[in-house]
């Protein structure tokens, strides 16, 4: 459309220029004829031309001007001066008219371009307003109106229904500095969508509880333990604390003492900073909750638990003692009791640590024990120098127990055998450890494999560490054997179908080892 108007303007300008050129040629011929006509009346050519210019080419008026003027030179001179003032010196009427035509064409061209730009801008603004109105209409009809207040919704609807009035085109240029920037329809729609998501998110947060009730009507949050009955609290706490042997025994002793002597204040007061209480009771699951269920109260100022004399309830004490005695008969308690006794044995054995060489044997051992350990160390190969071999780590009991003296380590070569490791352990801890390992009361486990399974010392004692998967690094642990391992019943122990892969280059598979 813009180019069409521009083409029309150019065509019109060319036609106008051609017409003026034709008129100019006709004007020159006509002017010469008028001058010749006045010359035939006896006037000079110069005076005739001035008279024609003064009378705009009218021969009759020019003749009257020449005849009626007594001083024709003055009149004609004034007329000539007036005509000369209207145009620059050296410029003819033809040149002046040509310049006016060119200026007019330029002005028309500029107006045409401004009009085209103005129309294009108005069309773009109209399309943007229509797109924004359509977006607001869709937003009002959708879910976005759920969060718009009624007053704002009415104002928005009135704005949408108001017809868009187009401004009349003006040729004056407007000041664009104070006008707001024009946003695209995509930017407007993106802003509306973001606002809608924000409103819906806030609304969903406010109604989260009701939504959960509607979608999961049968889901109920259980009550807290302290909100349940005293009987249920005591039974549940006793069930949770039963794997912890010392906590069960300590609580049972405390409640028994309170029941037998309720008037003694020291039985009804427990110092929470006591080392034994901190180690065995305070952080164990259900232990302190059981005392709170027995009406003990925390005294923050003294950091203690206290049972007031008037809150002593014989029925609760009887129930608590019965629940703890029942916990002592459970499988969890008995298993934990065995492991506690085993770790006590490990601590006793760890005290006999004599080092990994003859030079490091502890003083105070009997001569017989010293000779036995030296015999074990004599069958153990020499430790490789720094940078050769691989480390072998051995733990007595579980690592979490952190038994003092229950950890030893040294380097071995890959072609060393398991019997060399056993001789080294005999030199460190004596014959008792090896005898209980051979009798399967205790077992030696590879801690680098999962699940952890014991090694058959009789079957693999002549196998290399690389074959057993203990090279280039080994980690062994002395653990308590269960009944199936002691009796040699592999199926009962779960060794019939062993999972896991070989560890290390050249190591045997688990099915070959077990």
Image (spheres, rainbow, N blue to C red):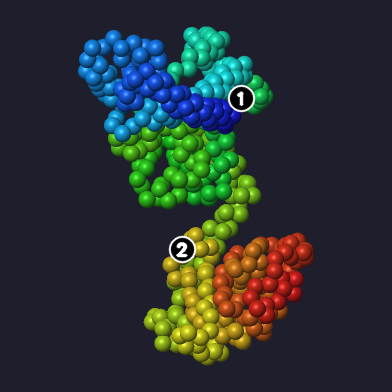
Between residues 358 and 185, which one lies in front from this camera angle? 185
Q: Is residue 406 left or right of residue 420?
A: left
Between residues 390 and 350, which one lies in front from this camera angle? 390
Measured as percent of width and height from the top left, residue 277 is found at: 41, 47
Q: CA gap, disc 2 to disc 1?
A: 48 Å
At x 61%, y 25%, the residue is 212
Measured as percent of width and height from the top left, residue 351 is found at: 44, 71
**SS of the residue under disc 2:** loop
In the image, is residue 335 above or below residue 8? below
**SS of the residue under disc 1:** helix
Can see residue 217? yes
Quarter of the rendering containing residue 47: top left
At x 36%, y 30%, the residue is 92
In the image, is residue 163 above or below residue 28? above
Between residues 136 and 122, which one lies in front from this camera angle? 122
At label 1, counting other C-alpha atoms closer than 10 Å, the crowd grade (few under 14, some 14-19, many 20 or more) is few
At label 2, counting other C-alpha atoms closer than 10 Å, the crowd grade (few under 14, some 14-19, many 20 or more) is few
Quadrant of the rendering where the C terminus is positioned: bottom right
Q: Tag 1 or tag 2, which sits nearer the N-term?
A: 1
Q: Is residue 352 left or right of residue 468?
A: left
Which-is-in-front pick, marks 2 and 1? 1
The total of numbered circles placed on residues is 2
Measured as percent of width and height from the top left, residue 107 is found at: 43, 27
Q: Which mark is residue 483?
A: none
Can see residue 86? no
Q: What residue did someone put label 1 on?
A: 212
Q: Is residue 314 left or right of residue 299?
A: right
Measured as percent of width and height from the top left, residue 224 is found at: 53, 29
Q: What residue did someone put label 2 on?
A: 402
In the image, is residue 282 above or below residue 126? below
């Amino acid at each position: 459309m813009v180019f069409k108007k521009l083409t029309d303007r150019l065509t019109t300008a060319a036609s106008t220029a051609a017409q003026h050129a034709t008129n100019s040629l006709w004007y020159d011929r006509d002017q010469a004829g008028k001058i010749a006509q006045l010359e035939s009346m006896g006037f000079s050519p110069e005076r005739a031309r001035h008279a024609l210019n003064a009378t705009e080419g009218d021969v009759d008026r020019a003749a009257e001007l020449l005849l009626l003027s007594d001083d024709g030179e003055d009149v004609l001179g004034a007329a000539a001066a007036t005509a000369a003032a209207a145009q620059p010196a050296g410029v003819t009427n033809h040149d002046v008219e040509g310049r006016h035509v060119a200026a007019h064409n330029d002005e028309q061209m500029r107006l045409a371009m401004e009009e085209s730009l103005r129309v294009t801008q108005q069309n773009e603004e109209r399309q943007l307003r229509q797109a924004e109105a359509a977006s607001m209409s869709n937003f009002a009809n959708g879910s976005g109106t759920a969060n718009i207040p009624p007053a704002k919704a009415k104002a928005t609807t009135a704005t949408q229904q108001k017809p868009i009035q187009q401004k009349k085109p003006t040729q004056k240029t407007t000041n664009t500095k104070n006008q707001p920037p024009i946003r695209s329809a995509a930017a407007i729609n993106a802003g509306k969508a973001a606002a809608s998501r924000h409103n819906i998110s806030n609304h969903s947060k406010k109604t989260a509880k009701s939504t959960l009730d509607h979608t999961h009507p049968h889901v109920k949050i259980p009550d807290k333990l302290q909100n349940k009955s005293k009987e249920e609290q005591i039974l549940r706490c006793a069930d949770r604390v039963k794997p912890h042997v010392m906590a069960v025994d300590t609580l049972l002793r405390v409640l028994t003492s309170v029941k037998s002597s309720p008037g003694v204040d020291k039985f009804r007061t427990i110092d929470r900073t006591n080392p034994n209480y901190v180690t065995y009771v305070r952080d164990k699951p259900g232990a302190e909750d059981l005392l709170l269920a027995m009406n003990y109260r925390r005294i923050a100022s003294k950091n203690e638990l206290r049972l007031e004399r008037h809150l002593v309830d014989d029925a609760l004490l009887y129930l608590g003692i019965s629940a703890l005695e029942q916990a002592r008969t459970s499988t969890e308690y008995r298993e934990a009791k065995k492991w506690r006794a085993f770790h006590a044995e490990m601590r006793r054995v760890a005290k006999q640590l004599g080092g990994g060489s003859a030079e490091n044997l502890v003083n105070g051992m009997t001569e017989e024990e010293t000779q036995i350990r030296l015999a074990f160390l004599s069958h153990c190969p020499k430790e490789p120098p720094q940078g050769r071999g691989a480390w072998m780590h051995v733990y007595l009991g579980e690592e979490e127990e952190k038994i003092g003296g229950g950890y030893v380590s040294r380097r071995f070569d890959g072609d060393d055998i398991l019997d060399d490791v056993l001789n080294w352990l005999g030199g460190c801890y004596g014959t008792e450890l090896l005898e209980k390992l051979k009798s399967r009361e205790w077992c030696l486990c590879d801690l680098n494999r999962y699940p952890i399974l014991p090694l058959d010392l009789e079957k693999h004692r002549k196998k290399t560490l690389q074959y057993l998967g203990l090279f280039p690094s080994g980690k062994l642990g002395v653990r308590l054997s269960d009944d199936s391992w002691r009796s040699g019943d592999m199926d009962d122990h779960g060794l019939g179908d062993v999972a896991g892969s070989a560890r290390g280059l050249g190591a045997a598979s688990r099915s070959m080892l077990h």
